Image: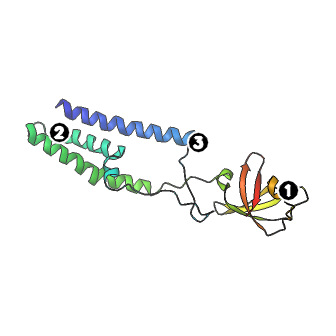
Amino acid sequence: MGAYVVGLVLGVVGFAVMAVGGLTRHSHGGRAGHGRAGHGGRAGGVRGHGRGLGRLTSPRFVFSVAMGLGLTGIILHPFLAGWFLALVAVAGGVLFERVLVGPLWDSLMRFASEPALTLESCTGDDATTVTTFDGRGHGIVSVELDGQVVHLLATLQANDRAGGSRVRSGTRVRIEDVDAAQNRCTVSLR
């Protein structure tokens, strides 16, 4: 029966560590990498479930099967023994994951949202000039960020300024660098 207690404890502790890790990551501003489809040609972030071997080796799957195996083994220990109990316990662990934990987890994940984009995520995106740039290469550009139009003070990068390019209102430019603290960016001609 000791192996079943270990399985149950492993599952419970594993889920607790996952929960604490998730809460810590979110409360300290940690964020996963993400992309945006349709912005500068970058691909969208991966979303959804893993398939095949990836799903079988996910921590959630391993911990929920361990918990189910432990519960099944402990409950059925008075009635079954030996390899038959071990086989039924493994089947109980998989059933626990497929019938209880998996559907519950999937329904909870429907409420998860994509992380908010930051100004820094605009690097490499296209922007539109709002004003004609002055002789020193300064102007205002607009970019769409999370469905909102954001205006930034922009400076034309040095090699485009040196070429004597005149940037008029409505010109498409590329954001090369962003200083979010100053609400500024460096742009280049496309």
Residue pointed to by mark 3: 29
- Whichever of callouts 3 and 1 sits on the residue coming sooner in the sequence is 3
Residue at 83% across, 68% down:
169
Residue pointed to by mark 1: 162
SS of the residue under disc 2: helix
Q: Are marks 2 and 3 in contact (CB under 8 Å)?
A: no
Residue at 20% across, 32% down:
3
SS of the residue under disc 1: helix
The answer to whether residue 83 of the structure is visible from this angle is yes
Q: Quadrant of residue 189?
A: bottom right
Frontmost residue, 78 versus 3: 3
| Amino acid type of the residue that numbered disc 1 sits on in the rendered structure | Ala
Q: What's the distance in space between the residues labelled 2 and 1, CA to CA?
A: 76 Å
Q: Is residue 75 above or below residue 185?
A: above
- Residue 30 picture location, percent across and down: 56, 42
Quadrant housing the C terminus: bottom right
76 left or right of 100 in image: left
Q: Are marks 2 and 1 in contact (CB under 8 Å)?
A: no
Q: Quadrant of residue 172?
A: bottom right
Quadrant housing the N terminus: top left
- Whichever of callouts 2 and 3 sits on the residue coming sooner in the sequence is 3
| Amino acid type of the residue that numbered disc 3 sits on in the rendered structure | Gly
25 left or right of 141 in image: left
Farthest residue, direction front: 163
- Residue 122 picture location, percent across and down: 67, 56
Q: Residues within 10 Å of mark 2 (few under 14, many from 20)?
A: many
Residue pointed to by mark 2: 73
- Whichever of callouts 2 and 1 sits on the residue coming sooner in the sequence is 2
